[in-house]
């Protein structure tokens, strides 16, 4: 649209008058009389030619900047969704891993307790097994919390948390 200043402008006009007295009729009389006029006008200014180029270039650069911003926003959203999805996968893997660790720690505690009850284990071994079990339970709980948070972030990233 800004490049239109490079070209001449053609304008047309028309006029119909039905008046009493009609000022275009000579001699004027007290009669109703129609008159009409048609015309065309071509205008062009060298100043418009000089100004149109930089204005068009400015608008084109703004359009390019908006296009680049659109792609950057799209890439940012795609990255956010991908990271959120990867976090869900990692959290699910952490739950599976800590579940297996929890089963192993429970079995280790059970064995240490039976050895201690039979007089073949030490109190230190039993306390270490109980500490490992408590730590594994805590890690398992953290994995579940992380999984829930990862799912919430994924729901937010794909826009499902907005109604």
Image: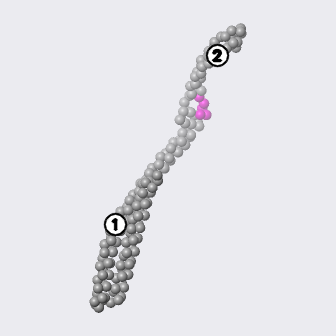
Helix, strand or loop at mark 1: helix
Left or right position of 75 against 31: left
Residue 142: image quadrant is bottom left
Look at the numbered disc 2 and give the secondary structure of its residue: strand
Residue of label 1: 93
Q: Is residue 23 left or right of residue 38?
A: right
Residue 140 painted magenta: no
- Compared to residue 97, the image places residue 6 above or below, namely above
Decide if residue 76 is in sight here: no
At x 33% / y 71%, what residue is drawn? 99
**Does the magenta stretch mainly form a helix, a strand or a loop?**
helix
Does residue 32 show up? yes
Q: State which region is magenta.
A: 44-48
47 falls in the magenta region: yes
Report the residue marked by disc 2: 17
Q: Name, please, the residue furthest toward the bottom.
A: 119
> Depth-wise, is mark 2 or mark 1 nearer the camera?
1
Distance from the alpha carbon under mark 2 to that under mark 1: 87 Å
Q: Say which residue appears at 59% left-offset and 34% top-offset.
A: 48
In the foreground, 29 or 107? 107
> Can you give x and y, in whole percent of width and height, for residue 150 in the image?
41, 63
Q: Residue, x 34% and y 72% (percent of image)?
A: 98
Number of numbered markers: 2
Q: Nearer the viewer, residue 110 or 46?
A: 110
């Amino acid at each position: 649209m800004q490049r239109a200043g490079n070209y001449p402008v053609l304008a047309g006009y028309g006029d119909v008058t039905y008046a009493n007295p009609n000022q275009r009729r000579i001699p004027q009389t007290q009669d109703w009389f129609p008159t009409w006029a048609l015309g065309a006008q071509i205008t062009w200014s060298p100043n418009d030619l000089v100004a149109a180029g930089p204005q068009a270039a400015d608008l084109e650069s703004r359009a390019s900047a908006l296009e680049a911003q659109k792609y950057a926003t799209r890439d940012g959203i795609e990255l956010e969704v991908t990271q959120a999805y990867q976090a869900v996968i990692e959290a699910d893997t952490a739950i599976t891993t800590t579940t297996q660790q929890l089963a192993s720690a429970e079995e280790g505690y059970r064995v240490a307790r039976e050895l201690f009850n039979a007089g073949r284990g030490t109190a230190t071994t039993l306390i270490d097994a109980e500490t490992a079990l408590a730590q594994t339970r805590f890690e398992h709980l953290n994995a579940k919390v992380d999984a829930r948070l990862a799912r919430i972030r994924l729901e937010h990233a794909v826009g499902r948390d907005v109604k």
